[in-house]
Image (spheres, helix red, strand yellow):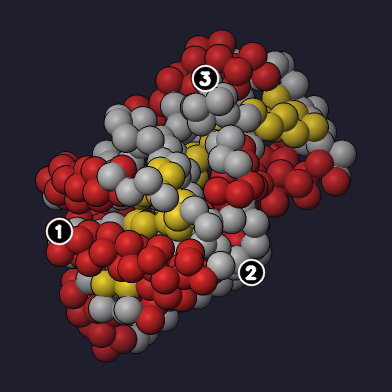
C-alpha cells in the first residue's frame, strides 16, 4: 500500500498508539480526587505541556477540544459573542477550510459583516489587502497557516504583525492544522490570539484537537457543563486521545526541520517527473511559499474521481481535493484561478515522512498507465 493522503488524515504513530493503551489502563476520570483520577489528570497535563512547548506558549493557554473544527468554531463564535454588540466586522480569506468558512457564513446570516480576501492571479494572498480591510469596527481576522488543497503558505505572521501594530485590539485567529508539526509554529511570532490544531493530522487519533487562547483573553465557553478545561470547554476529557496527541507532538517536535527537508526532496522529485508529462498540469507552485507536503496537479482528460479509483485499484491512495468536500467541486481551486476543466481533473498528493522515493516513482508510472488507458477510452 502507498498512502499519499496525509492531509486528510495520518496513520497513528507508535508513540500515540502506546500512549493510548497506557491511558486506557489509567482509566480514571481526570476530575476525580482519588488516585486513578489524579493519574488521568497527570496524563492530560503532560499532553498540555507538550503541546504548549511546541507552540512556545504556557500550558494554561492550551484547551483540549474534540477536533480543530470545534477549536476554530470556539474562537470565532466566542469572539462574536464577546465583541458582537460593538464590533461587527470579521476579515478572512476565500481559501479557508470549511471550519472557518462556514462559521463566517453563519455570522453573516446573523447580521455580521464578513470581508473575504481573495488571492491574486498566481494564488498569493496579499497582507496589504487584509490590512486594508481592517478598521475600528473589526472584531477578528482569521486566516489559515497552510492551505489544505494546494499547500500554499499564507502570510500570517506579516499580516498579524501589521494588524497588531495598527489595531492592537483586533483579535487574530490562525487555523494551523496543515502546518503544525510540518513547519515551525510559534504563537508569539505569529502574533495570534487563537490557534487551532488537530490530532489526526499529526499521527495521533481522530476525535481530539486543541485551541490556544492567549492568556488574559476571555471568551464565552462554546460548550457548557461541568466546567472542565478551566471552564472553557466542559465535558469529561478523552484522556487516551489527549495523551496520545501529546506523545505524537513530543515525538515529532524535534524533527520538524529534518522532515521538512526530506519531504521537500520527495516533492521536488515528483514535480520534476510530472513536469515531463505533457498531459499533466501542476497546480501547486514550487518554492518557499508552498509547503512541500502537498502537491496538487491535474491529469487532463481524466476526471479526478476516475483517476482516484484507478490508483486505488493499484493500492495507491490519494485525494481528489479536500477530504471535507466529499467529492464536491472545490471552490478553493477556483480561487487559485485553476480553470474548471483542470479542477475537475485535479488530484492532491500529501506526503508524510514514511513515504519513500519508490512511492513517487510508482505513482508517476501508474499515472502514465492511466493516461494510456483511461484517457484513450474517453
Residue at x 42%, y 71% (from the top left corner): 373
Q: Are marks 2 and 1 in contact (CB under 8 Å)?
A: no
Mark-to-mark CA distance, 2 and 1: 50 Å
Q: Name the outermost residue toward the front.
A: 376
Residue 127's tag is 3
Q: Is residue 190 above or below residue 376?
A: above
Residue named by callout 2: 225
Tag 2's secondary structure?
loop
Q: Nearer the viewer, mark 2 or mark 3?
A: 3
Residue at x 32%, y 79% (from the top left corner): 315
Q: Is residue 224 above or below residue 121?
A: below
State which quarter of the image contains the C terminus: bottom right
- Seen in the image, is 247 located left or right of residue 127? left
Report crowding for label 3: few under 14, some 14 to 19, many 20 or more residues within 10 A (C-alpha).
Answer: some
Residue 113 at x, y percent in the picture: 80, 32
Q: Quadrant of residue 344?
A: bottom right
- Seen in the image, is 32 located left or right of residue 140? left
Residue at x 68%, y 32% (from the top left corner): 116
Residue 357's tag is 1
Q: Sequence-wise, which precedes: disc 2 or disc 3?
A: 3
Q: Nearer the viewer, residue 367 or 4?
A: 367
Residue 332 at x, y percent in the picture: 59, 45
Amino acid at each position: 500500500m502507498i498512502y499519499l493522503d496525509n492531509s486528510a488524515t495520518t496513520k497513528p504513530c507508535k508513540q500515540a498508539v502506546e500512549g493510548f493503551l497506557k491511558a486506557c489502563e489509567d482509566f480514571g476520570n481526570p476530575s476525580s480526587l482519588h488516585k486513578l483520577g489524579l493519574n488521568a489528570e497527570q496524563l492530560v497535563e503532560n499532553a498540555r505541556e507538550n503541546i504548549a512547548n511546541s507552540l512556545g506558549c504556557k500550558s494554561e493557554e492550551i484547551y483540549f477540544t474534540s477536533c480543530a473544527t470545534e477549536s476554530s468554531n470556539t474562537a470565532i463564535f466566542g469572539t462574536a459573542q464577546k465583541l458582537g454588540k460593538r464590533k461587527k466586522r470579521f476579515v478572512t480569506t476565500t481559501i479557508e477550510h470549511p471550519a472557518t468558512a462556514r462559521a463566517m457564513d453563519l455570522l453573516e446570516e446573523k447580521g455580521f459583516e464578513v470581508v473575504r480576501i481573495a488571492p491574486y492571479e498566481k494564488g498569493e494572498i496579499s497582507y496589504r489587502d487584509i490590512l486594508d480591510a481592517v478598521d475600528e469596527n473589526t472584531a477578528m481576522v482569521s486566516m489559515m497557516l497552510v492551505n489544505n488543497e494546494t499547500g500554499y503558505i499564507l502570510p500570517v505572521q506579516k499580516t498579524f504583525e501589521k494588524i497588531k501594530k495598527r489595531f492592537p485590539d483586533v483579535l487574530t485567529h490562525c487555523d494551523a492544522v496543515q502546518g503544525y508539526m510540518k513547519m515551525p509554529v510559534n504563537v508569539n511570532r505569529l502574533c495570534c490570539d487563537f490557534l487551532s490544531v488537530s490530532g489526526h493530522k499529526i499521527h495521533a487519533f481522530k476525535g481530539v484537537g486543541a485551541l490556544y487562547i492567549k492568556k488574559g483573553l476571555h471568551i464565552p465557553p462554546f460548550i457548557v457543563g461541568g466546567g472542565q478545561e478551566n471552564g472553557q470547554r466542559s465535558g469529561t476529557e478523552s484522556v487516551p486521545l489527549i495523551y496520545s496527541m501529546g506523545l505524537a507532538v513530543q515525538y515529532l517536535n524535534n524533527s520538524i526541520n529534518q522532515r521538512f527537508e526530506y519531504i521537500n526532496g520527495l516533492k521536488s522529485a515528483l514535480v520534476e517527473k510530472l513536469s515531463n508529462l505533457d498531459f499533466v498540469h501542476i497546480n501547486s507552485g514550487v518554492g518557499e511559499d508552498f509547503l512541500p507536503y502537498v502537491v496538487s496537479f491535474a491529469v487532463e482528460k481524466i476526471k479526478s474521481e476516475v483517476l482516484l479509483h484507478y490508483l486505488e485499484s493499484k493500492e495507491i491512495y490519494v485525494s481528489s481535493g479536500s477530504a471535507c468536500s466529499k467529492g464536491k467541486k472545490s471552490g478553493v481551486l477556483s480561487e487559485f484561478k485553476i480553470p474548471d476543466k483542470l479542477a475537475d481533473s485535479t488530484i492532491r498528493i500529501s506526503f508524510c515522512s514514511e513515504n519513500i522515493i519508490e512511492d513517487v516513482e510508482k505513482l508517476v508510472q501508474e499515472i502514465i498507465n492511466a493516461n494510456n488507458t483511461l484517457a484513450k477510452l474517453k
